[in-house]
Image (spheres, helix red, strand yellow):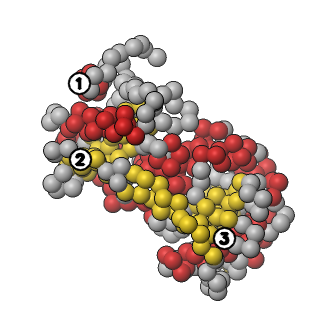
Amino acid sequence: MSNIAIPTLRTARLTLRAFREADLPAYAAMMGDPEVVKHLGTGQPRDTAATWAMMARAIGQWGMHGYGLFAVEAPDGRFAGHAGLLQPHPWREPEIAYSIAPAFQGHGFATEACLAVYAWAARARGILHPVSFIRPNNAASLMVARKLGAREEATVSMMDAPALRLRHGPPPGEMPAMAAATLIDLPVLHSKRLRLRPLSAGDFAPMCAVHADPDVMRYLGDGTTRDGAVTWANMTLWLGAYGLGGSGYLAVTDGESGALLGRAGVLDTYDWPEPEIGYTLAQAAWGQGYAAEAAGLVRDWAWRARPGKTLVSYVKVGNAASGNVARKLGAVMTGVI
């Protein structure tokens, strides 16, 4: 067993902690508010499924980088927003990012949370002078960044729109108070030939190679290859999903060399019909029984760790190899959807 450890920070009024499943209704309401999101990302409101995926990726980044976004808890215990360090691919450095729900705006919560984040990042992770990317017309966010001592450095393009890159100065002097960290358990599974373990940043390049192979991707998703940004988003979601539902994907590695062969696991996202056993291997690992071996490990773990849950595999029509693996595991076709 392995785990992701996410610290808990306390300020005079706020608690900064790991995201929880129970945060989803409040976070989805926040991310579905056009006024909240008009300066974030593409500026489009997110639905509940997209917000769940954001939460999973936030948790997963902690596992990949050792830092990430915190959920911000108000003095009365209600979910109030997020603040922390954001660094998706291909960003070369972390960003201090923050967004507060409308009911809690105007109380200085964003500034208070970000001061704690920066103090922790500097002293616990050695991260000095991070950036913030802010749309030029986002006056409230610019005000927070300047209160933190950030200075405008350049105008850059982000998602086809201009953004100011602000550089933060020296970190605040005091480390925030710490409470018990959240530990998210992740399985490590073994067979005679394979070791299935949590994904890590070191798996990024080989996973990109898997996702760049048209033959591998032919029956996955929309059938197209995936670039580095999408692969990173996939990996953080698969890892962080363990913190929201107790399952996700694991790296499938050679038991002796440790080389990455692919991924396998049980994915149970917010908008998925049923928990699914999934498996994808690099083409060089095909034809050796690895997929059935890895998926069998995952199946047996899932029945033990997730009693009372169903397990399915969704196999594209025409994908005979994947269908054969499912049948080897005892799966029975129940219909076409």
Q: Is residue 38 above or below residue 146?
A: above
Name the residue carrying label 2: 190
Residue at screen point 27% across, 34% down? 296
Residue at screen point 74% across, 54% down? 78
Q: Which numbered dot is residue 86?
A: none
Which callout, 1 or 2, points to the residue nearer the camera? 2
Which of the pair 16/81 is nearer the observer? 16
Residue at screen point 23% across, 47% down? 190
| Amino acid identity at mark 1 | Lys
Proximity of marks 1 and 2: CB atoms separated by less than 8 Å: no
Query: With 132 as the anchor, is 181 left or right in this view?
Result: left
User: Could you tell which of marks 3 and 2 lies nearer the N-terminus?
Assistant: 3
Label 1 neighbourhood size at 10 Å, few (<14), some (14-19), many (20+)? some
What's the CA distance linking mark 3 and mark 1? 51 Å
User: Could you tell which of marks 1 and 2 lies nearer the N-terminus?
Assistant: 2
User: Could you tell which of marks 3 and 1 lies nearer the N-terminus?
Assistant: 3
| Amino acid identity at mark 3 | Arg
Q: Is residue 244 visible?
A: yes
Residue 308, percent across and down? 45, 29
Which image quarter: residue 270?
Answer: top right
Image quarter where the N terminus lies is bottom left
Name the residue carrying label 1: 328
Q: Is residue 173 above or below residue 12?
A: below
Question: Does dot 3 land on a helix, a strand or a loop?
Answer: strand
Query: With 18 as the anchor, is 39 left or right in this view?
Result: right
Which callout, 3 or 1, points to the residue nearer the camera? 3
What's the CA distance linking mark 3 and mark 2? 39 Å
Label 2 neighbourhood size at 10 Å, few (<14), some (14-19), many (20+)? some
Which of the pair 124/143 is nearer the observer? 124
Name the residue carrying label 3: 10
